[in-house]
Amino acid sequence: QMCVVCSDIANGVHFGAITCEGCKKFFRRGLQEHSTYSCKSSRDCVINPRTRNSCRFCRYQKCLSAGMSREGKRDVRSRLALSCVSLQRFKWGGQPRSSPPWGMPGMCKHALGRPMLIP
């Protein structure tokens, strides 16, 4: 799948949106540093893998419009469950299956020793 912010290759759900590692880290730094960005253009810069570092304001706005938020950062158990679902979607495309086709049925269903419901 593609990052909903910059269209690079996504590697999971971060802060509530499917993003690449670069956009995840960019958004986290913005939250940690309480950054205030400004756009030198007309606030509609193109954000893609090649241009994503050109305008922090537009990239951050695209993160927000894609659904990224501080609340999207979940506790460890929720992140693990979401990661299992994300992994299934990345591996098989679309909707997750109830069990992986290669014979690892308990990997996600019993993460951290407790049963988890996978939609």
Image (tube, grey):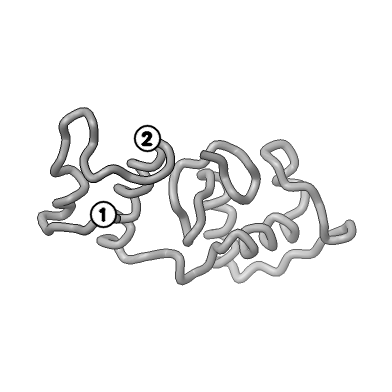
Q: Is residue 41 left or right of residue 26?
A: right
Q: Residue 119 versus residue 90: which sits nearer the camera?
A: 119
Give the CA distance from mark 1 to mark 2. Answer: 15 Å
Q: Residue at x 15, y 55 (%)?
A: 112
Q: Residue at x 38, y 45 (%)?
A: 95
- Give the tally of numbered discs: 2
Residue 8: x and y in percent read: 60, 38
For the C terminus, the quadrant is bottom left
Snapshot quadrant of residue 75:
bottom left
User: Amino acid under label 1?
Assistant: Ile
Q: Is residue 52 left or right of residue 80?
A: right
Q: Is residue 2 left or right of residue 75?
A: right
Disc 1 is placed on an element classified as loop
Q: Is residue 78 left or right of residue 26?
A: left
Residue 66: x and y in percent read: 60, 59
**Mark sitting earlier along the chain (1/2):** 2
Seen from this angle, which residue lies furthest top? Answer: 102
Q: Residues within 10 Å of mark 1 (few under 14, many from 20)?
A: some
Residue 12: x and y in percent read: 44, 46
Per the image, the residue denoted by label 1 is 118
Snapshot quadrant of residue 72:
bottom left
Residue 34: x and y in percent read: 61, 71
Snapshot quadrant of residue 35:
bottom right
Disc 2 is placed on an element classified as helix
Q: Residue at x 38, y 47 (%)?
A: 86
User: Amino acid under label 2?
Assistant: Trp
Residue 92 tag number: 2
Residue 90 tag number: none
Q: Residue at x 16, y 31 (%)?
A: 103
